[in-house]
Amino acid sequence: MASLSLSSKPSPTTSSLSTPNSRDLILRFQNPNSISFRSSLVSPSSIELNRTGCCALNAGRVRSRICASSTQVMDQSPSETSSGVPTIVEVDLGNRSYPIYIGSGILGQPELLQRHVHGKRVLVVTNNTVAPLYLDKVVDALTKGNPNVSVESVILPDGEKYKNMDVLMKVFDKAIESRLDRRCTFVALGGGVIGDMCGYAAASYLRGVNFIQIPTTVMAQVDSSVGGKTGINHRLGKNLIGAFYQPQCVLIDTDTLNTLPDRELASGLAEVIKYGLIRDAKFFEWQENNMQALMARDPDALAYAIKRSCENKAEVVSLDEKESGLRATLNLGHTFGHAIETGFGYGQWLHGEAVAAGMVMAVDMSYRLGWIDDSIVKRVRDILQRAKLPTAPPDTMTVEMFKAVMAVDKKVADGLLRLILLKGPLGSCVFTGDYDRKALDETLRAFSKS
Ligand SMILES: NC(=O)c1ccc[n+]([C@@H]2O[C@H](COP(=O)([O-])OP(=O)(O)OC[C@H]3O[C@@H](n4cnc5c(N)ncnc54)[C@H](O)[C@@H]3O)[C@@H](O)[C@H]2O)c1
Ligand SMILES: [Zn+2]
């Protein structure tokens, strides 16, 4: 079995505050066909990622800069966002790089947004839940001191079931009726549904216009607004139509979470927990110590969790923008979770709830394979319970329902279902089709009716 180690020294220009970047990079690929990182991106059958390798990426490629005087370390809650000075996490994608601004009240800082608006015409895409809460604020931020800018808005119906081609047309209708030209900017204001739809509209309107994300759910702030995946659902499957299209910037005002329902908050935390499990044990430990604060919406705890999640996602996306390998690890628990979302009917369980149960199943399977010890199994259950997330699928799920959905999973290659599983100490995972089928069957049987 061939294995490859890559190492790179940190760039001298990188801030010493970028905690994980000060170590060398070691990525190991256990694929006999894989002779380099690039070739491993073609279609690796197995990628092994330990915490060092996954987190300590080339500091020159991934810069996460912290503005002003913030000096937080991993296991302390930060305080810089309370002062209104945003934290900036940079997504490094060459000439498509962009900043993620994170902070409390930063929608009240027009210059942050305005510096990323191209042209004089803006179209804000939002929905009928978020518009009454934040649309005026965003229009103010776009126009304050900037009378030459004119802002249109389109307000879509709220819900995953409207993430489709018919509703997307309303965005194009508005843009065309308003005679927006190539120099316009689309702004997504809302959760992941709005972000994905607006992004896809921006990718295809006049073959691509500028695009800004203002995510307002935890799910969107820690996951969907970062990394450029955009799209809509088809009646035969979720997110089947879409494009990779990166925004000009992501602006995360943590104050918008004050109006988010508790269940939506918890759903987003499932993705936060995921980052800890797949690549960041220290972050997982921080979450174990701070889950109560997160659930109580402590602004500093939330800001830190969002920042660390964005850093993790930015690092992965910078290395594998189009999901040829490494990026797939962000889908821990999602194969089982998708089966739950599909089998149980969309809308019954939120995405993060299904992912939480899916992560427990992936962890169970990893344990059955002998790849992790039982303390990790217990810690995963405990943290999810403390986040008030499910730790098992709904009891209507059958083995056959899981198998039917898993057979058409996007990660099936040459008839082989590749899964993200934990292997080794906390914070290490593999993306592999190389596992004992018996373990999968046992996990499915343990968590569902036969
Ligand atoms: N592109 C990606 O990489 C990616 C990653 C993960 C998820 N997603 C997609 O994201 C979607 C799920 O995102 P979501 O969980 O944000 O769901 P969502 O967009 O449906 O938002 C959840 C609910 O919260 C409401 N809401 C949003 N912000 C609010 C606020 N500040 N206050 C009060 N209510 C608010 C919304 O109107 C909605 O009712 C799915 O379609 C999923 O496919 C995409
Ligand atoms: Zn997800």
Image (cartoon, helix red, strand yellow):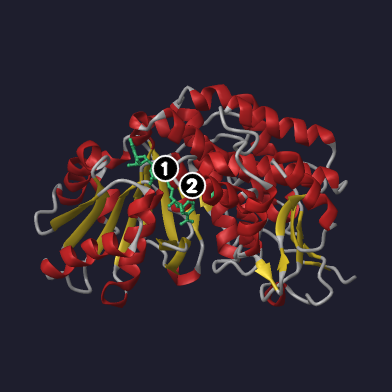
Q: Residues within 10 Å of mark 2 (few under 14, many from 20)?
A: few
Q: In terms of secondary structure, where does tag 1 sit?
A: strand
Q: Are marks 1 and 2 in contact (CB under 8 Å)?
A: no
Q: Position of residue 410 (x, y in %)?
A: 60, 65
Disc 2 secondary structure class: loop
Mark 1 packing: few (<14 Cα in 10 Å), some, or many (20+)? many
Residue furthest to the left: 147
Which residue of the protein is positioned furthest toward the front in this rendering? 450
Near-viewer residue (441 or 38): 441
**Where does the image place residue 81, in percent across and percent down from the top left?**
42, 34
Q: Is residue 369 visible?
A: yes
Q: Residue at x 53, y 37 (%)?
A: 269
Reply above or below: 375 against 11. above
Badge nearest the viewer, 1 or 2: 2
Kind of residue indicated by mark 1: Ile
Q: Is mark 1 within 8 Å of ligand 1?
A: no
The residue that disc 2 covers is: 345
Identify the mark nearer the N-term, 1 or 2.
1
Residue bearing the label numbered 1: 102
Dividing the picture into quarters, in which one does residue 262 lie?
top left
Residue 427: tell me if it is visible: no
What is the count of numbered marks? 2
Screen quadrant of the C terminus: top right
Tag 2: residue type? Gly
Q: What is the number of the mark on residue 25?
A: none
> If the image is split into quadrants, where does the N terminus sit?
bottom right
Residue drawn 20% across the image and 38% down it: 132
Q: How far, Cα to Cα, is label 1 from label 2?
A: 34 Å
Spot occupied by residue 432 in the image (x, y as percentages of width and height): 75, 61
**Residue at 32% of width from left, 59% of height from top?**
198
Q: Left or right: 192 with respect to 406?
A: left
Q: Residue at x 32, y 65 (%)?
A: 165
